[in-house]
Amino acid sequence: MKNRKMTPAMRRNLAGYLFIAPALVGLLVFYAFPMLFSLGISFTDWNLRLSPNFVGGDNYKNLFQDQVYLKSIRVTFYYTLLAVPVSNVYALLMALLLNMKFKGRSVVRTIFYIPSIVPAVAAAGIWMYIFNPYNGFMNQLMQYFGWDPQMWIYSPSQVIPCIVVMAAWGAGGTAIIYLAALQGVPTVLYESVSIDGGNAVHKFFYITVPMISPIIFYNVIMGVINSMQVFTQGYIMTKGGPNNNSLFYVLLLYRRAFEQTTMGIACAMAWILFVILGVLTVLNFALSNRWVYYGGE
């Protein structure tokens, strides 16, 4: 039987598979296998010291009977509901400002963008000083205007809004995305509104928002995913306090995994978070048809 010679198409396919092989191996070794392994561990009582024993769905059932766990879900959702709209509105307003023509615009753009590249731990340290209830910048500012000082991140009712302000401060990357979207809006559309007697408000709501709605949708999706996984602020700034009012989901997961070494419960928490994020993403896509406009439609 004669050996079949490789055709040019077969050679191209083989070359393609060889080029993507490192990425596929990395995907399987560093993503697919750990995910499947954690799924299996979530049905055990593994604590890193003893061999894992199969416990079925007990980890999942016990989690929803754990008041601390339920509070971490409420805290994380509360933070997400505040942080996503506040950060996106602030970033969009910042982008509108940076899209204007004025002297020193490049310098101002750099200043607004710098907070987004500050390491999270360093940013947490900066805001811990700003919100320090004793000699922090905010209380010094409030005393200057004759207002009463506040406890800020040490107050159960103020801790999440304070962290939301910190999140908005670091929204420079989101603002750059909005800025790029704004620069892609055809100027002829704005000219048409002006000819019809429209003002800046009309231009914003009837031209700008619809034209950049796909970018808004993208930033909302990414904002929800990132907010549901917030960790550093609670770990560095508040340790989950006061009274667990900043005990974010991933912070509790970290404690269950690496402080209490209950890996089975931690893996169950990770998979519940995966499902929650999947559901939220699907809902966002399902609702996007009502307000997202694509130019090709």
Image (cartoon, rainbow, N blue to C red):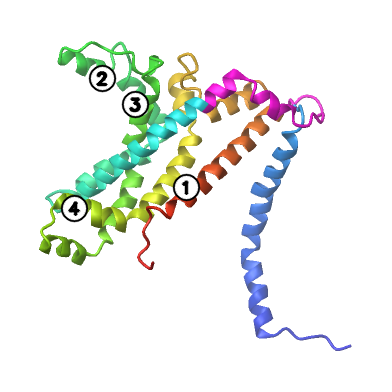
User: Which residue does the image show at 79% across and 85% down from the upper left?
Assistant: 4
Sequence-wise first label, 4 or 1: 4
* Residue at the spot 58% in from the left edge and 36% down from the top edge: 273
Q: Height in image: 202 above or below 52?
A: below
Horizontal and vertical percent for residue 66? 63, 20
Of badges 1 and 3, the one in the foreground is 1
Disc nearest the viewer among 2 and 4 = 4
Q: CA distance from mark 3 to mark 2?
A: 12 Å
Q: Callout 1: 10 Å neighbours few (<14), some, many (20+)?
A: some
Placement of the C terminus among the 4 image quadrants: bottom left
Q: Is residue 58 visible?
A: yes
Mark positioned earlier in the residue sequence (2 or 4): 2
Q: Which residue is mark 1?
A: 284
Of the numbered discs 1 and 2, the one sitting upstream in the chain is 2
Secondary structure state at the residue bearing disc 4 = helix
Q: Label 3 amino acid?
A: Ile
What kind of residue is marked 4? His
Query: Which residue position holds label 2?
Result: 138
Q: Are marks 1 and 2 in contact (CB under 8 Å)?
A: no
Q: Which residues are magenta?
A: 47-73
Secondary structure found at label 3: helix
Q: CA distance from mark 3 to mark 4?
A: 39 Å
Q: Where's residue 145, x and y in %?
A: 15, 16
Name the amino acid type tagged 1. Asn
- Provide residue 138's location: percent of width, then percent of height: 26, 19
Residue labelled with disc 3: 126
